Image: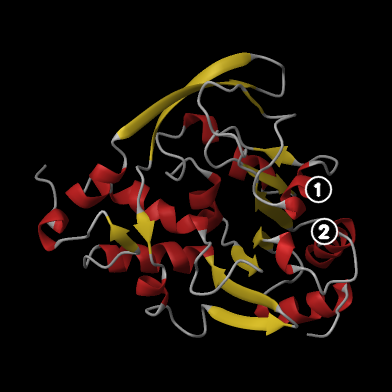
Amino acid sequence: YPKFKTKELIETLKPLGLKKDATVFIHSSWDQFFNFEDSPIQLIEALLNEIGQNGTLAMPAFPKNQNPDQLFNVKRTPSGAGFLTEIFRRFPNVKRSINLIHSVTALGPNADYLTKDHHKSKTPWDHKSPYYRLKEVDALILGLGVGKNLSVATSLHCIDSLLKDSYPFFAQLFEQEITYQYKDYNGTVNSHRMNIRISSTLNTKQISKYMAKDKFIETKLSNLEIYRIPAKYLIEKGLELANKGITMYVTPKPVKKLFIPFKN
């Protein structure tokens, strides 16, 4: 595989939707950047330069240790979502959502809206989460080195959260509840109770194959696998499929009877 630099990666991402004023959410695995010849800082600066002052860059920043007994410090707890995300977390003026399971960082005009209410979420991916709000701000999701078939696309879990009160299948996914303490930007310690997803097995290829080819695009630069998909399309298509009983879940098994809607 050939070596490549920041400029080549940016030029690869431009036709996928990286542009001025865009809100861009990036999933990444730095382990796959072994042919990349520049630093994480150079890449982040180039991404910010490309979207400009009116653009917003966001990344996951969930802690590696998700034990509810651990204090989540929004200013200090490191990101466990990969090396690039930890470097971004430390950038000046980056805002971070308060959520032990799936915290998000963001920089730009939409950063506050994306991150401000995550500690009020009833699940990590509901209407108040950054992952759902990516849809509301028409964000583009990019995957860099995280595999194929939407194997890492956290906004897919919004479907689970949005439908948990509609179908028994999704309700069972959130039978576990946790309460953890967090320290906010003012240094105040408080607590957040939410439902989290039970242990499950996924095969995202079961739904990625239904995605429109002009919306969900996979490509490569050297060894680096890249994908793009608009958040709004991803969530809306995921909801459409789920309402037909089509999900990414292998276990729990999505049997037909679990997709009979709850009675009001």
3 vs 73, nearest the viewer: 3
Please name the colour scheme applied to the rendered image.
secondary structure
x then y, percent, for residue 84: 76, 54
Report which quarter residue 196 is drawn in.
top left
Question: Does residue 167 appear in the picture of this structure?
Answer: no
Foreground mark, 2 or 1?
1
Residue 97 found in image quarter? top right
Which label number is shown at residue 68?
none
Screen quadrant of the C terminus: top left
Q: Residue at 69% of width from left, 42% of height from top?
A: 79
Q: Earlier in the sequence, mark 2 or mark 1?
A: 2
Is residue 64 depicted above or below 147 in this figure? above
- Residue 157 lies, with reference to residue 263, above or below; the image says below
Res 179 visible: yes
Q: Is residue 128 left or right of residue 55?
A: left
Circle 2: is it few (<14), some (14-19), or many (20+) Cα within 10 Å? some
Provide residue 161's location: percent of width, then percent of height. 36, 47
Please rate how many residues cluster around mark 1, counting C-alpha atoms within 10 Å: few if below 14, some from 14 to 19, many from 20: some
Query: Marks 2 and 1: CB-CB under 8 Å?
Result: yes
Count of all numbered marks drawn on residues in the image = 2
Q: Which residue is mark 2?
A: 44
Q: Which of the labelled discs sits on residue 87, or is there none? A: 1
Residue at position x 66%, y 14% in the image:
188
Q: Secondary structure at mark 1?
A: helix
